Amino acid sequence: MVQKVRRTLRIRDFARETLMARFIRKIVVPLLRVWFGTCRVTILNEGVYRDYFLSDQPIVGGTWHRGAVYFLYFFGKLQPRIMISQSKDGEILAQYASGFGVVPVRGSSSKGGREALEQMRHHLTSGGKACATVLDGPRGPAYVAQKGMIVLSKLTGAPFIPAIWSANRTLTLRNSWDKMILPLPWTRVCIAIGDPIHIAANTTKKEMERYKKLVEERLNTMMVEVDRQCGYRR
């Protein structure tokens, strides 16, 4: 009897997940593709964007959780590998990301991170273009970096490039821990691309902590500046 109930619950969970996946792929992704497509984009530090994002140069990227939804759309054309947690929330994000051409790699600092990092390392060392994640995910604290992508940069030799965006008109989910933002239709989006950070293969553990702090400080400085330029108030 207990096994039958468990089997029924698994079937129901699978049906709900399948329905959610279809809704995301058939409704949410097309809607946001049109929505985000109306935005006017300005790229700051365009030389780095051109030399690294529009070339065959493999890169490792990172941003804050607040801007992930728009960045999955904008950078989807690179077909990057993005580390996404194995949680139920992560499953929703993975379905959304794959709709834009992103390849989700499931894992996080709390579960499956080492395996996910190995998949990404193999991708970059086998001719792949880009790997990235939200550095303060999946549950924060906001604007505090974890070092998974910095380790990946060290393992592969691919430069780490921080990126963040802001806009002059946004929808801000103020009740969420990350204060997620979405650009409103027909707004001006500014994407800040940081200078590449090169991390040598022989970097020590102590030096890695300094790189983590550097990445965190640089992203936060970039965030303040791009918010200021757009007139966005957190």
Image (spheres, rainbow, N blue to C red):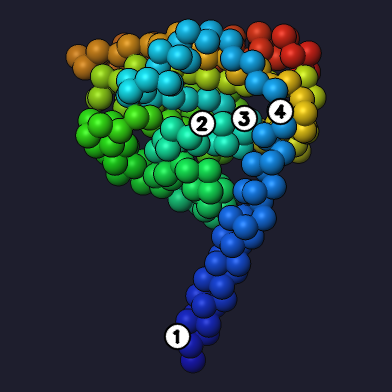
Q: CA distance from mark 1 to mark 4?
A: 52 Å
Give residue 48's position: percent from left, percent from top: 45, 10
Give residue 150's position: percent from left, percent from top: 36, 22
Neighbor class of circle 4 (other Cα within 10 Å; few <14, some 14-19, many 20+) is: some
Which quarter of the image is occupied by the C terminus? top right
Neighbor class of circle 3 (other Cα within 10 Å; few <14, some 14-19, many 20+) is: many
Q: What mark, if any, has residue 67 been given in the picture?
A: 3
Q: CA distance from mark 1 to mark 3?
A: 43 Å
| Disc 3 element | helix
Which residue has dot 2 on it?
A: 75
Give above or below for 4 relative to 172.
below
Query: Which three-letter amino acid code belongs to the residue tagged 4?
Result: Cys
The nearer-to-camera label among 4 and 3 is 4
| Disc 1 element | helix
Q: Quadrant of residue 153?
A: top left
The nearer-to-camera label among 1 and 4 is 4
Q: CA distance from mark 2 to mark 3?
A: 12 Å
**Residue 213 appears anywhere in the view:** no
Residue in the picture at 25% in, 25% down: 155
Q: Earlier in the sequence, mark 2 or mark 3?
A: 3
Query: Which three-letter amino acid code belongs to the residue tagged 1?
Result: Gln
**Residue 19 appears anywhere in the view:** yes
Residue in the picture at 70% in, 23% down: 40
Asked if residue 143 lies left or right of residue 112, the reply is: right
Neighbor class of circle 2 (other Cα within 10 Å; few <14, some 14-19, many 20+) is: some
Give above or below for 181 relative to 190.
below
Q: CA distance from mark 4 to mark 2?
A: 14 Å
Which residue has dot 4 on it?
A: 39
Q: What mark, if any, has residue 3 been given in the picture?
A: 1
Query: Which three-letter amino acid code belongs to the residue tagged 2?
Result: Phe
Give residue 139's position: percent from left, percent from top: 56, 38
Give residue 143's position: percent from left, percent from top: 58, 23
